[in-house]
Amino acid sequence: MTSSPIHRAVSASLLLALPMLFFGCDTSKHQTDSALVPAHPFADRTIPPSGMDPAQLPPPIKISGIGGSARGTAQPVVIDSRRFVPQVAERPPWIGEQIRPGSILPAHSRNKTLINGAPNNLSSGTLTDRPRVGAGTVACFPGITSTPWTPPDPTIGVGPNHVLETVNMEIAWYLKDGTPQFQQRLDSSGEPGFLEEVGAGGFTFDPKCFFDPLRERYVVLALERYDDESWLTLAVSDDDDPNGIWYKYRTNSLVDIDGTTYWVDYPGFGYDETGWYTTNNLFRDVGDGPGFAGTLLRTFDPAGALVGETLDFTDLLIPSASHQVAQVPDFDAPAIVVRSGDSTSIELLYINDPLGTPSALTKAVSVPEYSSANDRPPTPSGGELNPIDRRILNVIVRNGSLWAGHSVSTPEDARTVARWYEIDLDKWPSDQFGKPVLVQAGEIRPNELAHTCFPAIAVSGSGNAAVVYTSSSQFELPTLKVAGRVPDDPAGTLGASVVLATSNAVPESGTTYRWGDYFDATMDPEDDGLYWTVGEIYTPEGWRTEIGSFRIELIGDINGDGEVNGADLATLLANWLSDNPDCDLDGSGTVNGADLATLLANWG
């Protein structure tokens, strides 16, 4: 990958004429000689042996069944990232066949039947035309692009000075202006790969990462699967700079339940003041047990990993599938595990004593009716995007509220739509009698044609929220957008959407292209008003990730008193036709009628 400055150009190809702001980022790319198409390393759809001596494999972890628990440890391998040569392994975008990791894993499935929930009268809000993304605050740069694997599964961790990204199957980090500092394969194809020296073989998948602001460390997770092997591999930086020392741990995740072994898939990944948590679907490896066994929830004790010593972890087997773990950036709440429930609820799960003898406590929260996102978003080529299903995609806990999002369909509209929630935890689980309740739900429906999916939510300490998502239709290229809200906005609403990046190609007609599987959004630990995100667009060379930052503001509140009123209007008029950045609300460079219209749209 080559260095790229931050782009602020507007991308508007084939967009519908909508009442929408555009502060996007350039997505143009060069064409690659199609005659030089490489062969995929897994073209035969066979996972190679891990290279580990079978005699040295640890025994499976024995768990008695749902509610059962186990404990384990792992020893560190200490790696200095500065020893990788080159630091940025420049590779052209992969133009050969792209393979979905799930297609070469052992055959696996589970029952996804949606149970009908109790009817309710709850409803969702939608978009408004009020601007909430600050003009001139949007900045984007290209992330990792087109590896041999699809979808990218992008996540980010943002520290004081760096942005770290993981995808299938690479890792990279950048300065906040987009300057690349490091990029390598995660698996053993990297010469060496980032996780190779801890034992990772040629097949890592479903990576995730975050920056833990409570401990000021970057934490990376990747899954591995080989014959009779399943691993959760963890890497932890030794400080808040990803350059330098990393402590890496390969933790066994082959689970024995009543004589049948299971491997892990599709992780959730979160943290709180107690630990780091990952949830993983369990699918049968060998034996006569059921094909799906529930979810393995593993809690890592950070104490040893912070200093490069033994990593202790605790496992708990919980029912159902595709749970996501909250990220809790404040010392005021425990992590909550969330999954979609029946057709009118989502389920919250709290782990009591996660590092001791863990047990689960659950609460169901009523939400507006939904079903799985089965209507696949179209594109102008006739190709379609696969939005997966109704699973919860990311979770954040701040200020006593839990925020979450997923892609759904509704009884009123079969289109796929990005939906988000805010839930008042009512002091639960600290107060066992607390009753979590829905505060607001919102759906992103910009017009009568667009499908939206893969929402990722970030929330500031002041309660401002942003939702990043994909929008697509038969007239709109897959587009990465963001919409935001401030606490005084009407319940369930987000302001006008802003384009972060637009695809300049689409999947071929007649194809269904796996999108996502998830995007990510987070707050800057040094500036709680600055949002960061990563998502996916499509180019002639395949997928590409885009990393962006922006602010959510009450646009027009020039004097910062929390209202848009006569004082702000007077200040704007006093700076008419000037270049005063405080009054140039749309970032055009001149204070004019467009800024006046924006101010009046937010009046009061």
Image (tube, rainbow, N blue to C red):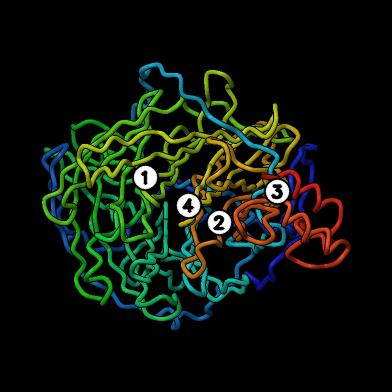
Q: Quick check: marks 4 and 2 in contact, CB under 8 Å?
A: no
Name the side, left or right, on which 390 lies relative to 513: left
Helix, strand or loop at label 1? It is: strand
CA neighbours of label 3 inside 10 A, class few (<14), some (14 to 19), many (20+): many
Location of the N terminus (image quadrant): bottom right
Tell me the kind of residue under disc 4: Phe
User: Mark number for residue 503?
Assistant: 3
CA neighbours of label 4 inside 10 A, class few (<14), some (14 to 19), many (20+): some
Which one is earlier in the sequence, the residue at label 3 or at label 4? 4
Q: CA distance from mark 4 to mark 2?
A: 31 Å
Which one is earlier in the sequence, the residue at label 1 or at label 4? 4
Residue drawn at (36%, 53%), measured in percent from left and top? Answer: 269
Tell me the kind of residue under disc 1: Gln
Q: CA distance from mark 3 to mark 1?
A: 28 Å
From the top left corner, tell me how far across and down residue 276 is, in percent. 29, 58
> Which of the two marks, 3 or 4, is nearer to us in this view?
3
Residue position marked by numbered label 4 in the rendering: 42
Tell me the kind of residue under disc 2: Thr
Name the side, left or right, on which 504 lies relative to 418: right
Q: Quadrant of residue 306?
A: bottom left
User: Mark number for residue 533?
Assistant: 2
CA neighbours of label 2 inside 10 A, class few (<14), some (14 to 19), many (20+): many
Which one is earlier in the sequence, the residue at label 3 or at label 1? 1
Residue drawn at (23%, 57%), measured in percent from left and top? Answer: 252
Which one is earlier in the sequence, the residue at label 2 or at label 3? 3
User: Mark number for residue 80?
Assistant: none
Q: Can see residue 31?
A: no
Q: Nearer the viewer, residue 600 or 480?
A: 600
From the top left corner, tell me how far across and down residue 556 is, in percent. 70, 54
Q: CA distance from mark 1 to mark 4?
A: 29 Å
Residue position marked by numbered label 1 in the rendering: 324
